[in-house]
Image (cartoon, rainbow, N blue to C red):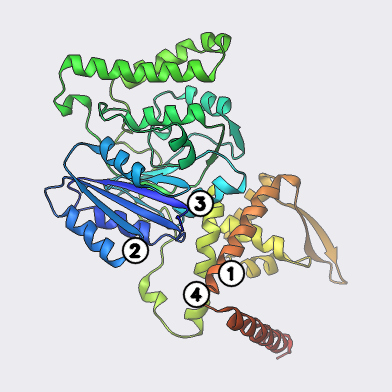
């Protein structure tokens, strides 16, 4: 049976980083994939490292060839790929554990032909998030092209590795990398693909860690005539693309933006700047859990692991909707509460300090994701919260519900159907007993 995703990684003299790259792929939450590693004539231990992974995991295939470049390596893998979708990585980089699942879910939830995502740019020990499209809905080719024309040479659009492609489109039009191009070759493949794709979707989830800094054309020992020829070819691809996507009148209106691509790319601007705006220390961008805490035994360790597993999936929903993890936890808690709580009760239920609770509640109400009306109840006139959710919260709540389902699915994944039924009966019995004990007055 063919895998759903073919993940393609060209490898050349990457012995220092290829292990991290492969580990991040094999440790994906999403498991229905094949990993195609193409050793492009490496002179170090890269090929042997790839072979060792293939010997341990049947999803890994390794192809060894003479050094003919990254485009030829990707083309070889495309010829061997069997997946419904195509995903690319560079051997210097790595992906988050939810990368493939996030891409596939976005591709299939509202069926489209390409998914594009945010990514992390890494320089040394600093990391920053990079994205460009904030719209979360479906886009037509014209919509997507309009976004792209605002930033003609933006790295976000030009690379392969923050996207998911349909292999059927690639094969129907025999789309391949141009081995004669060693600059913007990714972008030209994308332009050709976009010409035949009809629907697109962007997700604001950073799933890829980009650390490789590609050299400029000058560093490739190309002559001036070769450089000019290559850039002219790239520009002609770009110009032909917009003539295909736009009608004649629209193209004339946008001609200056098309020409701007040539100016923006003239300085080899395909590599993001080394100075990272709004950067943070690498490791602080996602939730981290100490393995020492995970290995512990006892009631508090059990509760901690359950909480962190839920946090892991809520974090993806939070990133997608520009929320903090605390915001997402509070919104889910308010959604699940089936009574009118006091603020103290709501903060306790969400497992948040009162100060964090207050800040998150202010943010959620300010964004129109929840509406709170204070009411007075009982003889003591205790102030309680009447909670309602505007229409604007619908998509965010759906993401939180997906996160909750993912959490439940993973938490119980090791149980067989009979075991699962027995577990649910016992768990209900245990919860009833706990509730009865807690309701008893001291």
Tag 3–tag 4 contact (CB < 8 Å) = no
Residue bearing mark 3: 102
Q: Quadrant of residue 27?
A: bottom left
Circle 2 SS class: loop
Examine the rendered structure and indicate whether residue 332 appears above or below residue 224: below
Determine the CA span between mark 1 and mark 4.
16 Å
Mark closer to the observer (1, 4): 1
Residue bearing mark 1: 408
Q: Give the side of residue 105 with respect to residue 8, left or right.
A: right
Residue drawn at (22%, 19%) of the image: 227
Circle 3 SS class: helix
Determine the CA span between mark 2 and mark 4.
34 Å
Determine the CA span between mark 1 and mark 3.
17 Å
**The C terminus is located in which quarter?**
bottom right
Residue bearing mark 2: 58
Residue drawn at (78%, 63%) of the image: 384
Determine the CA span between mark 1 and mark 2.
28 Å
Circle 1 SS class: helix
Residue bearing mark 4: 304
Determine the CA span between mark 3 and mark 4.
25 Å
Neighbour tally class for label 4: few under 14, some 14-19, many 20 plus, Cα within 10 Å: some
Determine the CA span between mark 3 and mark 2.
23 Å
Marks 3 and 4, the one that precedes in the sequence: 3
Examine the rendered structure and indicate whether residue 332 appears above or below residue 412: above
Using the image as rendered, state which of residue 145 and residue 399 is in the foreground: 145
């Amino acid at each position: 049976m063919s895998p759903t995703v073919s993940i393609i990684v060209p490898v050349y003299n990457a012995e220092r980083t290829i292990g991290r790259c492969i580990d991040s792929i094999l440790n994906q939450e999403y498991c229905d994939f094949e990993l195609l590693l193409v050793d492009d004539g490496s002179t170090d231990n890269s090929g042997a490292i790839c072979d060792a992974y293939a010997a341990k995991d049947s999803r890994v295939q390794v192809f060894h060839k003479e050094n003919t470049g990254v485009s030829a390596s990707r083309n070889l893998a495309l010829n061997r790929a069997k997946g419904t979708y195509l995903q690319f990585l560079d051997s210097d980089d790595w992906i988050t554990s939810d990368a493939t699942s996030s891409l596939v879910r976005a591709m299939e939830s509202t069926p489209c032909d390409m998914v594009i995502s945010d990514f992390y740019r890494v320089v040394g020990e600093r990391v920053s998030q990079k994205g460009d499209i904030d719209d979360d809905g479906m886009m037509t080719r014209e919509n997507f092209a309009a976004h792209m024309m605002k930033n003609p040479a933006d790295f976000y659009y030009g690379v392969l590795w923050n996207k998911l492609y349909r292999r059927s489109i690639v094969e129907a039009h025999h789309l391949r990398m141009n081995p004669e191009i060693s600059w913007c070759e990714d972008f030209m493949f994308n332009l050709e693909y976009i010409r035949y794709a009809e629907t697109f979707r962007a997700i604001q989830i950073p799933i890829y860690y980009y650390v490789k800094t590609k050299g400029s054309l000058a560093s490739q020992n190309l002559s001036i005539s070769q450089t000019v020829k290559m850039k002219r070819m790239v520009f002609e691809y770009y110009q032909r693309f917009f003539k295909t996507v736009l009608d004649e009148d629209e193209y004339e209106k946008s001609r200056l933006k098309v020409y701007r691509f040539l100016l923006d790319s003239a300085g080899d601007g395909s590599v993001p700047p080394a100075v990272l705006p709004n950067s943070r220390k690498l490791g602080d961008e996602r939730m981290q859990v100490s393995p020492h805490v995970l290995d512990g035994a006892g009631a508090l360790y059990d509760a901690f692991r359950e909480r962190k597993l839920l946090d892991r999936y809520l974090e993806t929903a939070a990133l997608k909707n520009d929320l903090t993890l605390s915001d997402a936890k509070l919104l889910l808690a308010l959604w699940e509460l089936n009574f009118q709580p006091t603020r103290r009760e709501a903060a306790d239920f969400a497992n948040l300090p009162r100060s964090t609770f207050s800040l998150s509640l202010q943010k959620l109400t300010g964004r129109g994701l929840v509406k709170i009306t204070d009411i007075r109840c009982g003889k003591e006139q205790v102030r309680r919260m009447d909670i309602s959710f505007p229409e604007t919260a619908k998509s965010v709540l759906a993401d939180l519900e997906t996160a909750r389902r993912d959490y439940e699915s993973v938490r119980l994944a090791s149980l067989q159907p009979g075991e699962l039924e027995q577990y649910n009966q016992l768990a209900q019995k245990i919860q009833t007993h706990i509730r009865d004990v807690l309701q008893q007055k001291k």
